[in-house]
Amino acid sequence: MTEALNSEQKLYEGKAKIIYATDDPEVLVTYFKDDATAFNAQKKGQIANKGAINCKVTTHLYGLLEKKGVSTHLIETTSDREMRVKRVDIVPIEVVVRNIAAGSLCKQTGIKLGTKLEPSLVEFYYKNDDLGDPLLTRDRIAAMALTSAQQLDRLTEKAQTVNRVLSEFFASCEITLVDFKLEFGTDKNGELLLADEISPDTCRLWDTTEPDERKRVMDKDRFRQDLGDVAEGYQAVLERILSQLS
Ligand code: UDP
């Protein structure tokens, strides 16, 4: 069933998704767009069919995580690009898990691209575009009263569980899960749920079988770094997931 979406019901339009209200105040609809942005929206573009691919990838990965006991906000996927989700209060912290050094970690610390990180890093960033999503510390989170120390422990534990489940699954697809970003929210009962999306927009995914540093990239870095064949990278991720699940 597809919701009749109209602009009056539109609650929020982000860079990659639109959130709509429904007749049920506890239920929202997420619509996945083809728009792509990088570097805090300084670089903009479109990736053909990205919305539909990310909607499917998120659906499958959430399904896998639910089976392993990680609760998500997904109720049901209702069309190619739409999901009915539980309304949650988003925790204003982006949780990034890193298994291999890439991106901002390399830029900020000088750690060489591709260095294996053992144990994996769990990092927190402030969800605030005006400030450029700065890296947080536990003390900063406490000073800003963004969430409690106990909730931070829960976020960390859940992020580590997600990492175990997804690293293993992607490995079976011959994809290396380099790093990824998660968002969480609390529902009306105060339960912490995984929210937003998990897709090639929010993960670094390297083709394990491809030694070439530029060719192995299957995620948004193809767009960020102008590597070409962006949509093909996203599509290949979906196809490997589907063939592994079938
Ligand atoms: N990420 C994301 N949204 C953000 C920032 C990061 O989905 O606003 C993801 C990104 O795709 C990568 C991981 O989080 O998989 C780590 O990103 P990093 O801190 O290296 O930042 P980047 O260099 O990608 O801006």
Image: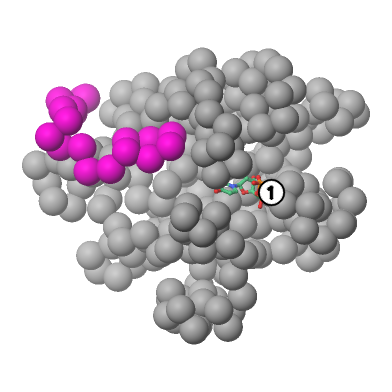
**Residue that numbered label 1 is attached to:** 179
Q: Amino acid at mark 1?
A: Asp
Query: With respect to residue 57, does 118 lie above or below?
Result: below
Q: Is residue 7 left or right of residue 94?
A: left
Q: Residues within 10 Å of mark 1 (few under 14, many from 20)?
A: many
Q: Is residue 45 magenta?
A: no
Q: Residue at x 55, y 55 (%)?
A: 132
Query: With respect to residue 75, does 68 lie above or below?
Result: below
- Considering depth in this image, is 111 or 195 the residue closer to the camera? 111
Cβ of mark 1 under 8 A from ligand 1 = yes
Residue 53 visible within the image: no
Residue 204 visible within the image: yes
Q: Residue at x 21, y 25 (%)?
A: 2
Query: With respect to residue 135, does 1 lie above or below?
Result: above
- Considering depth in this image, is 217 or 79 the residue closer to the camera? 217
Q: Is residue 166 left or right of residue 109?
A: left
Say which quarter of the image contains residue 232.
Answer: top right
Residue 72 position, x and y percent, is 40, 52
Residue 227 position, x and y percent, is 74, 22
Say which quarter of the image contains residue 99.
Answer: bottom right
Q: Which residues are magenta?
A: 1-18
Q: Residue at x 47, y 55 (%)?
A: 130
| Quadrant the C terminus occupies | top right
| Quadrant the N terminus occupies | top left
Q: Is residue 3 magenta?
A: yes
Q: Residue at x 89, y 26 (%)?
A: 212
